[in-house]
Amino acid sequence: MRFVCTIFVISYLLSLVSAGDYFAQLKAPFTADDLFKQDDSIKATHHVRDSIKSRISFGGFEGFSGKFEDDVLQRLLSNPLVAKVTPDIVVNALHIDQQTDAPKHLARLSQEGPVSKNPDSRAYCFDSEHEGEGVTAYVVDTGVNTDHPELEGRAVSGPNFSASENCNDKVGHGTHVAGLIGSKTYGVAKKINIVSIKVLDDEGSGTLSSVIGGLEFAVKHRQDSGMPGVVNLSLGAYKNVVLDEAVMATYKSGMVVVVAAGNNNIDACNTSPAGSPFAISVGAIDDTSDKIAPFSNWGPCINVFSSGIAVESLCGKNEESPTNLSGTSMASPVVAGLAGILLDKGVDYKDVAYHIDEMSIRGVIPKNSLVMRRGSPNKVASNGIRCY
């Protein structure tokens, strides 16, 4: 694995050119001339026509940019011919890093279709200026080996709510999950901070009260820190109203909640927390074919699918070698990493699910993989950046 810094793409940065610079899009079938004629008939100090910098007209899209005085801007905002008025944002070159020989779950995020089975042809392209820095990921799981060198000192242990004696991850599940969110080699958000909250014991089981206790800690810790946060729940049970209420409270506190869809090949709407409308629920695919994993839960409560078969990440017991695990438990942290990147970019927590949906690749899951999984979205998680 190595990193090269050779790819540039265009990205939007939400900053104003200067005060008063805006772009107005017109409703079809109106043109700029229609609006100018209407505005010229108004007795006013300033007119739209006099403030125009450029006009755009193509494929049914009509609009214009200009430096508008307040009175002109107010007329545009209330004009029935105008569809939208937006600040004339700056467009800059965005520096992208490319991780060659990348794990396939990362490669899948930055390409349109299934990954190659040849590891030498896989690459992960990502925005090196937004890797989750200043964001906290809460791993509510079996614990995390926070000293793992791949986590680069960015991981700490929170309290232990499980029945086990300490916070150590003897199962390896939580460490694997943390690695997918934010480790140096296997992580989506390579600079995110990680807080381990152990709620599952050394057999991988836990109680409802332990999970809710973990969520309470995550909420209060995030609020005290003032940092944006995402909590990952790679766990689940059959439908439980109390757990769903706790997830709702976690979300409403200002936290993004990402959850595993579950591994029972049933409708995720019948499970918790995957059925919660306040969580981003992630199903699993085989990223070499984009077929839904045979074990993955499915249905309309799923937001998106991500890699979930033979996913490579950290081994809790052996720091020298990675390990492959399968399950929606692996798909969820991949999307949690994407959420961390979006939060780093300044996206509001309420809008993260929308952006993950918008970036997702549609229509690539084979139809025969969806036919018995009614209501499942044909969407695969993506970071919106392609390796060309």
Image (cartoon, helix red, strand yellow):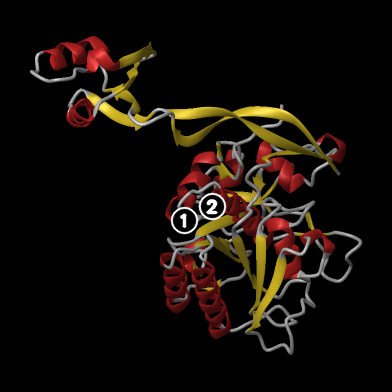
In the image, residue 375 sits, relative to residue 159, either above or below, namely above
Where is residue 164? Give x, y as percent.
Answer: 72, 87
> Neighbour class for label 1 at 10 Å: few (<14), some, many (≥20)?
many
- The residue at 65%/69% (across/down) is 195
Q: Is residue 363 left or right of residue 157?
A: left
Place residue 72 in its image quadrant.
top left
Where is residue 318? Give x, y as percent.
Answer: 89, 67
Place residue 41 in its image quadrant.
top left
Q: Secondary structure at mark 2?
A: helix
The quarter of the rendered structure image containing the N terminus is: top right
In the image, residue 251 sits, relative to residue 70, either above or below, namely below
The quarter of the rendered structure image containing the C terminus is: top right
Whether residue 375 is visible, yes or no, is no
Q: Is residue 25 left or right of residue 71?
A: right
Mark linked to residue 343? 2
- The residue at 66%/45% (across/down) is 291
In the image, residue 277 sits, relative to residue 347, either above or below, namely below
Whether residue 79 is visible, yes or no, is yes
Mark linked to residue 27? none
Residue furthest right in the image: 320
Q: Looking at numbered disc 1 in the image, what kind of residue is underneath it?
A: Tyr
Mark linked to residue 349? 1
Contact (CB < 8 A) between labels 2 and 1? yes
